[in-house]
Amino acid sequence: MSEEIDQNAEVQADGDVGVAEAEQAAESKMDLNVTIEDVGPCKKHVRVSVPRNSIDEVFSELLEEYAEKAEVPGFRTGNVPTSLVAKRFKSEISEQAKQRVLMASLEQLGEDSDLDPINEPNLDLESIEIPEEGDFEYEFDVEVRPSFDLPEYKGLKVERPNRETTDEEVDAYLEQFLEQYGSLTPVEAPAEEGDYVTVDIQAAHDGKTLTKIDDVSVRVRPTLRFQDAEFEGFADFIKGASAGDSREADVTVSMEADTIGMRGESVHLTFKVLDVKRIDTPDLNEEFLGRIGASSVDDLRDQVRQMLDRQVKYEQRQATRRMVMEKITESASWELPEDLVNKQVDNALRREILELQQAGFTSKEILARENDLRQNSLSMTRQNLQEHFVLDRIAEQENIEVTDEDLDMEIFSMAMQKGENPRRVRARMIKNGTIENLEAQIRERKAVDVILDSAEFTDIKMPPTVSNNIEALNRSVCRTTSQSDIDADADDDEGDEE
């Protein structure tokens, strides 16, 4: 009985403390005057006015703290007159008061308002000063999450692309795979499709040279894809050319190129052929198979088929996701601020490349897709951001979380594909910031899985995943790439292949 009484007393005491803390917190709240206005898509302008009495309370607290520890000649510590402390430490107290008032008012603003910021407010702390008299006012713009009604996302009817990996696709991929181990031999013959031509490329607009790309090797394929333009019919254009020949053509710059002023403009390209080479691929003999870790040709083909099956699943997931997201974002009429979209372009590109790496695509295939993504980066990013906000709301609704085990499994899979140590992959991702991208990908993927688990599917035919139609050149037709950028790209490629 006595133990029960003691426990009740402790509970009562705890309750009294909790009430006292709550009352103290309520009393310490500032009587803020806040005005919030819409100033653009997903952007708010906030004005905050802090009353003088709240400011004076902060100054008084700081003055007491300084008075307790101030060391002034002629006075013992803790016995310095507050008037002298206020005068001697005026600038330090003012600066700390500004920080405390700002932090406290921003925290209270976050608790009391329905603002849901995406980024930190653009406060210019250097220009903000607390006046010696009167209220303290400051204002800022902040990007916020869009407000929208969550659409119905369960029970959707979805067309799902599907296909079986064919022997022809395995053959096509094996051809690409073996070429990685092949050697180029110069030939005294006109270029044919599949050959390599070493060329100097000059890009000009209105008679003015934009960029020169010297001594670059280009595979003769139907399409040559730059970072900011696409040359359809490149194979027919360059076929028949020999060393010393020049060919000229016009291409149109992508409407989403980095060089804004050149979007949609026609650029004149001049190709000077320096030489023509053909590739000799190794034979699938016992020595070569042992080198790549395959016990037989059939074993190698099985490995290729499994990898292509993963790519099919990736393409299937991406296509299904696009269809699903089209359905649940068709009512997303809200716009996004252009500065937010522009800031997220590189981040969205990194995430897309990360998913391609996870799916087992080769570096050449990734480069081709990367250039395509760059040419459509703004619309892709705008769409991805809309999808992100919808999936984020669904993840919140479904209480979806990303566990350490989820991250470990994903990193282990990526490490296996590259033959690397998982710890090394994790360390690199933490260093370059892609670990956050991976976590966001997993969370969104789980949200998509929730949608797909309840969806009704109709399978449709899916196009082949392997294509030998595109040659990608990691260069721009609008701007010159410095040698340091080229070296950095090469270093990145080597790091990815280690």
Image: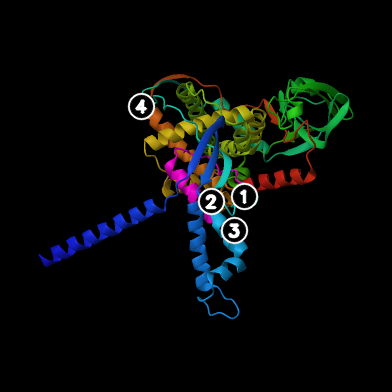
- Answer few, some or many: residues within 10 Å of disc 2's Cα (few below 14, many 20 plus, some between 14 and 19): some
Mark 4 surroundings: few (<14), some (14-19) or many (≥20) residues within 10 A: few
Q: Are marks 3 and 4 in contact (CB under 8 Å)?
A: no
Real-space CA distance between mark 1 and mark 2, rounded to the nearest whole angstrom: 10 Å
Residue 171 visible to an observer of this rendering = no
Between disc 4 and disc 2, the foreground one is 2
Q: Which residue is mark 2?
A: 102
- Report x, y in % for residue 457: 40, 21
Label 2: state its secondary structure: helix
Quadrant assignment, res 242: top right
How far is mark 1 from mark 3, CA to CA?
Answer: 10 Å
Residue bearing the label numbered 3: 95
Amino acid type for the residue under numbered disc 3: Glu
Mark 1 packing: few (<14 Cα in 10 Å), some, or many (20+)?
A: some
Q: According to the image, label 1 marks what residue?
A: 128
The type of residue carrying mark 2 is: Leu
For the magenta stretch, what is the residue range? 100-123
Sequence-wise, the earlier of marks 1 and 3 is 3
